[in-house]
Image: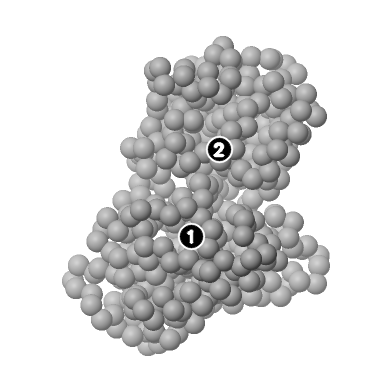
């Protein structure tokens, strides 16, 4: 244990922790990093720990979790996702909420999801002399560039990069959502490998499992999807940095060659903007936008697909949707990125990064080879069960806590 840290007050040989998690987002929302936060909190609770989450004012409450929210700000009451200048106000309020909560519950560990959260947790970590864990879900500056919030050639890029490096240094331990992210920390930020633990996103394979039967047919009918079409599913945020525009371009390319295909595109925000783009591309009769799908209902909607697609282009962010696809037994097409390759291995079908034509061809190849598609889906399901269990992840997280808090 570092000399700067105080010994925990109430840990037994079983090592039960009081964990203060910080989510610098509108937790809970039904996508990406929120799922990781939710499932980590749940498994830590199941392993006997107390978990409290500090987050923004907006978001969906989860019955089993102790969630402490900031007060609202009147000029931005409906904020949901993405980089924004308004986040400075949110984060000031969140920092105050974190410190107040930490002094009240006296945690043994502060666990910050993303760089912002770790920075906001640092004062409480110093005051209470307890470890600060950064849950690294991708490079902060790279994400801001992907979101077009930061210009890599602009004057603010270097200060932002230095701040990211400083947050990495301030954290006593770092958990990464992929092995690739671990390499980024070591190679690009000079982080000591010894304080990094790679704990990839995982999946609840009991909930996310193949479905069949009448319920599937009823849902297809409700959504207005003709039963004879091959359904390609996407579930995630709708944004350019998520590759949504590339997905629609790939859909247009594929539909030029065959018309027995339907794209079920699930997620938010910007639903109307992308629905309009689909109309402009002439593919609206072969695309269905559902908007937000509650996390609990995601397996039923994913089960409508024969093939899943992930057009995400980020080099450093995790991609938990891939694991949901895998657990559902869906053959999966993704752009060739380190994170996609890490999760899918040789069982993924890969397209050239940022190439809509290549993505369309990869999808067509799977549609044209149903036996191969079924075999890949079965193997991906087995891979998800074997390698990406939240129980295994929870035990790894606790070992990180034990290293720095015991």
Q: Nearer the viewer, residue 248 or 198?
A: 248
Seen in the picture, residue 265 relative to 136 is either above or below; the reply is: above
Write down the quadrant of residue 150 in the picture: bottom right
Q: Is residue 31 visible?
A: yes
Q: Position of residue 348 (x, y in %)?
A: 53, 34
Q: Nearer the viewer, residue 65 or 340?
A: 65
Question: Which color scheme is applied?
Answer: one colour
Q: Secondary structure at mark 2?
A: strand
What residue is drawn where x is 40% and y is 25%?
211
Q: Which quarter of the rendered picture does the N terminus lie within? A: bottom left
Drawn side of residue 7 relative to residue 62, left or right: left
Drawn side of residue 329 relative to residue 333, left or right: left
Q: Position of residue 326 (x, y in %)?
A: 45, 35
Mark 1 highlights which residue? Answer: 176
Q: How many marks do you count on the picture?
A: 2
Single out the mark in the foreground, 1 or 2: 2
Seen in the picture, residue 125 relative to 203 is either above or below; the reply is: below
Mark 2 highlights which residue? Answer: 235
Q: Which quarter of the rendered picture does the C terminus lie within? A: bottom left
Seen in the picture, residue 118 relative to 27 is either above or below; the reply is: below
Q: Position of residue 56 (x, y in %)?
A: 53, 64
Q: Nearer the viewer, residue 120 or 152?
A: 120
Write down the quadrant of residue 394 in the picture: bottom left
Write down the quadrant of residue 194 in the picture: bottom left
Drawn side of residue 75 relative to residue 48, left or right: right
Q: Secondary structure at mark 1?
A: strand
Q: Position of residue 96 (x, y in %)?
A: 51, 77
């Amino acid at each position: 244990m570092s000399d700067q840290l105080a010994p925990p007050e109430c840990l037994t040989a079983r090592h039960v922790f009081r964990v203060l998690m910080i989510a610098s987002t509108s937790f809970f929302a039904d996508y990406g990093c929120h799922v990781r936060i939710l499932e980590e909190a749940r498994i830590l609770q199941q392993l006997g720990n107390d978990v409290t989450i500090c987050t923004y004012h907006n978001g969906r409450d989860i019955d089993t979790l102790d969630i402490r929210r900031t007060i609202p700000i009147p000029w931005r009451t409906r904020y949901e996702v993405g980089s924004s200048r308004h986040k400075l106000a949110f984060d000031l309020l969140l920092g105050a909420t974190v410190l107040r909560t930490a002094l009240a519950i006296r945690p043994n560990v502060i666990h910050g999801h993303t760089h912002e959260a770790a920075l906001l947790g640092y004062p409480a970590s110093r005051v209470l002399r307890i470890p600060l864990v950064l849950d690294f879900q991708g490079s902060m500056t790279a994400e801001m560039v992907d979101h077009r919030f930061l210009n890599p050639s602009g004057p603010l890029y270097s200060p932002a990069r230095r701040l990211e490096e400083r947050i990495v240094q301030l954290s006593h331990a770092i958990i990464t959502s992929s092995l690739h992210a671990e390499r980024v920390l070591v190679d690009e930020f000079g982080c000591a490998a010894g304080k990094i633990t790679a704990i990839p996103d995982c999946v609840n394979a009991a909930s996310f499992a193949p479905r069949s039967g009448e319920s599937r047919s009823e849902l297809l009918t409700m959504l207005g999807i003709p039963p004879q079409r091959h359904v390609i599913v996407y579930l995630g945020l709708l944004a350019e940095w998520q590759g949504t525009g590339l997905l629609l371009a790939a859909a247009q390319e594929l539909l030029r060659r065959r018309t027995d295909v339907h794209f079920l595109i699930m997620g938010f925000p910007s639903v109307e903007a992308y629905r309009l783009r689909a109309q402009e591309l002439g593919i609206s009769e072969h695309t269905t936008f559902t908007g937000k799908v509650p996390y609990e209902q995601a397996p039923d909607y994913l089960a409508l697909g024969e093939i899943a697609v992930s057009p995400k282009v980020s080099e450093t962010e995790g991609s938990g949707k891939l694991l949901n696809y895998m657990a559902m037994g869906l053959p999966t097409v993704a752009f060739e990125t380190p994170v996609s390759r890490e999760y899918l291995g040789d069982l993924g079908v890969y397209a050239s990064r940022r190439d809509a034509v290549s993505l369309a061809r990869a999808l067509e190849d799977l549609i044209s080879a149903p036996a191969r598609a079924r075999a890949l889906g079965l193997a991906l399901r087995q891979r998800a069960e074997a390698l990406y269990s939240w129980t295994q992840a929870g035990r790894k997280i606790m070992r990180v806590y034990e290293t720095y808090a015991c």
